[in-house]
Amino acid sequence: MKHEDIGDELGRSKSTVTSFLDRLDKRGNVNNLPHPGAPRKTSKTADRRIVRAAMANTRVPLAELRKDIVSNVSQQTIRRRLREAGVRKWKALKRPMLTKEHARKRLTWAKAHRHWTRVQWEKICWSDESSIKQDSDPRRKWIWRHQTDQEKYAPQNVDPKAKHGGVSQMMWGCFIGNKLGPIALFKGMVNQHVYMDVLRENLLPFINALYEDGFTDFTFQQDGASPHTAKKTCEFLETAMKEHHFSLMEWPAISPDMNPIEHLWSHIKLELHRQYPDTWILKGPPEHVRRILQERIEKIWWKIGEEVLDKLVDSMPRRVHALLDAKGWYTNY
């Protein structure tokens, strides 16, 4: 007699009948094997409810999750159920704050550029500013020690930070395709007057050099920082675009993940401390330290090779598709 027929006659599923007969055949009895350890305190339904609650409100504390969902079990049990489902607490990533309106405009921008070819991306002149501090070493320090407070706080095992981060240096740079543009190093923060001077003394000569090399029909990219969108800056750029024959890219707010030059700033900060490990302990007046920082930053900048820039240009279609997948919200770039 077939298993499904037996099941129909007894009002049981085929799988139940099959499991019953398998136990009888293999062990000579139909009893379930004893389960080691204490009986499970939560049902499969409760397990799913725990996971759903945690994923619905990812910031909820474990104690609150226990109180609201299954107060008759311990926090440790809830933690185990989440881990069984592959869910655990992670440190939240820090990103610029996005609003629904920001996400909407970012998504609109991504849709407009979803079919761009590499040739089109090669004609974008990427630009940005960044600040680098004397002690801004992005590398995480690892040490060997025993698990004791005495060794934990020993001077040789502590990663010290200079007061206020030490001397800070502002920089602006640009690149197009696999051609590295100039880097401008200046003191203080960026305002519209400083920014126009940077463009006048660095961007425009670079554009002239590009035309001499046969580059035409390219677009300048800048973000929406207030010095970039100030009335006088806009007037300056309008005149420059007419005289130097380039256009300005429309750029969505809060979109550093779409600007590949951000990776060059990370590269500079990493190499500054890798190549010059004494950077964070440089002594002397601020102007002396700043002069050394500038020399080192320029050396690192001009060693950036074409293959690095090519990879950044190659990444643009992937960045756009990541933004589309995220519906305008945060991406992994």
Image: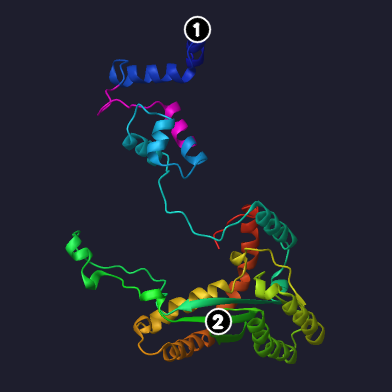
Number of residue marks:
2
Residue designated by label 2: 171
Q: Which of the two residues, 169 or 215, is positioned nearer the viewer here? A: 169
Marks 1, 2: nearer the viewer: 2
Q: How is the image coloured?
A: rainbow
The picture places residue 17, in percent across and down from the top left corner, at 43, 16
Q: Secondary structure at mark 2?
A: strand
Q: Amino acid at mark 1?
A: Glu
Residue 293's quadrant in the figure? bottom left
Q: Earlier in the sequence, mark 1 or mark 2?
A: 1
Crowding near the residue tagged with mark 1, few <14, some 14–19, many ≥20 C-alpha atoms within 10 Å: few
Q: Which of the two residues, 100 or 42, is positioned nearer the viewer here? A: 100
The residue sitting at the right extreme is 242
Q: For residue 72: magenta?
A: no
Q: Which of the two residues, 191 or 96, is positioned nearer the viewer here? A: 191
The residue sitting at the top extreme is 9
Is residue 285 something that shows in the picture?
A: yes
**Considering only vertical position in the picture, is 226 above or below 241?**
above
Residue designated by label 1: 9
**Considering only vertical position in the picture, is 68 above or below 110?**
above
Which quarter of the image is occupied by the C terminus? bottom right
**Considering only vertical position in the picture, is 162 above or below 76?**
below
Residue 134's quadrant in the figure? bottom left
Crowding near the residue tagged with mark 2, few <14, some 14–19, many ≥20 C-alpha atoms within 10 Å: many
Q: Amino acid at mark 2?
A: Met
Magenta span: 33-52
Residue at point 82%, 83% (across, down): 242
Q: Secondary structure at mark 1?
A: helix
